[in-house]
Amino acid sequence: MTHLDRSSDTDTTAAAHRASDAAALARRDFLTWVGASSLLALAAPGCALGPSGPRRAADAMNVGQLELAARAKLDHDAWLYLAGGADDERTVARNVEAFREIGIRARRLVDVSSVDTSVELFGVTHRTPILLCPVGFQQLFHREAEVVSARAAAARRHGMILSSVSNRSVGEVARTGVSPLWFQLYPTTDRRITQGLLQRAEDAGCEVVVLTVDAPVLGNRERQHTKLADMLAMGDLPLGNYEGFGEIENEFDPTMTWDMVDWLHDHCDMRVVLKGVVTAEDAELAVARGADGLVVSNHGGRQEESDRATIECLPEVVAAVDGAMPVLLDSGVRRGTDIFKALALGADAVCVGRPYIWGLAGFGQPGVEHALDLLDAELVRIMRLAGVTRIADIDAGFVTG
């Protein structure tokens, strides 16, 4: 064999080794990518994350993986109550889909070593713009109900809005130390009971009442079975805030008008926030009638089938308010990027509902805490990647669509 022949053999061998190394590197990169993606939700049993979701709250890489764990642990009726919506549930889906249609315009070469996520609402500084939505009947998801969610919120320094149809009373929830604690109100047709609810909220230290205005009647929730009504009738689901008031004829009030804002100001000392405003016309009326704040909300798609996501409603409401009062948003928030987009379009804060309940149902207090940690971390990450260090500096220039 000539020297040339031996050299050719050596080159061929080296090339083969390089190809083998490249293939190994490609496989490693692919496995790393898979390991960091939501495909982990399809991992085989025995892994930290299997078809039923993570085994521990801390193993979840996003709130969607907590949803898997909640679905696996809840009974069928409890899951339908949590996941269901009005009519064909298009609005439930639209709330999530609409966020994906908004792009983020990231800026570069900004010092983002320090990020401040604090916001001020009604003179109170919140560590984060993420609040816990009012979600009723949390005993369906954990035996200690709202107390567990409140403990998690207190531990992670998040504000919480307690539902008037909570299983645990506002006084009991307040004793967990959660702060700030706001009280969501469904006004019954019996104003004596309504006034009693307000008094109990004030006695518990609440400084804000959140009046739900999108529920003159219950939405058409076809997937919600009658088990909930049966449990209420049998006393298996206590209503802690209504104890001692006797029989409640109707927790909703179809006769309610804008005069209710005046009535609330006359009968309590709390700030009055209206939850469920989705149009400029109603936002203007809220300002004119003396409301103190708004939550752009469609009840998570559980009331009217509007086919409008709250993030689509937000800009017109913000424009109509024109800085006169804080504007919050809920429904469809699943990622820190969603929160960033809502803040960019004018929301002063964002409320989350189903994501923390997934954590509650799957893992109790550690699950709620981890859901909040994930959203907090995702918000800080996208702020850094987009080149902004303060919530106040996030504006419409950071988004498209």
Image: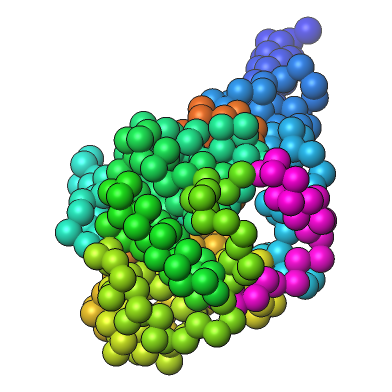
Left or right position of 269 against 237: left
Of residues 286 and 190, the one drawn nearer to the viewer in this rendering: 190
Left or right position of 49 against 327: right
Quadrant of the snapshot with the N terminus: top right
- Magenta region includes residue 229: yes
Quarter of the image where one finds residue 54? top right
Of residues 154 and 95, the one drawn nearer to the viewer in this rendering: 154
At which x and y percent is residue 68? Answer: 71, 39
- Magenta region includes residue 58: no
At which x and y percent is residue 225? Answer: 82, 56
Q: Residue at x 31, y 71 (%)?
A: 267
Residue extending furthest toward the top: 1
Residue interval drawn in magenta: 214-237
Dominant secondary structure (helix, strand or loop) of the stretch shown in magenta: loop
At which x and y percent is residue 289? Answer: 31, 87
Please tell me whether residue 314 is drawn above or below residue 9 in the rendered image.
below
Quarter of the image where one finds residue 252? bottom right
Residue 376 seen in the figure = no
Q: Residue at x 46, y 78 (%)?
A: 277
Of residues 94 and 305, the one drawn nearer to the viewer in this rendering: 305
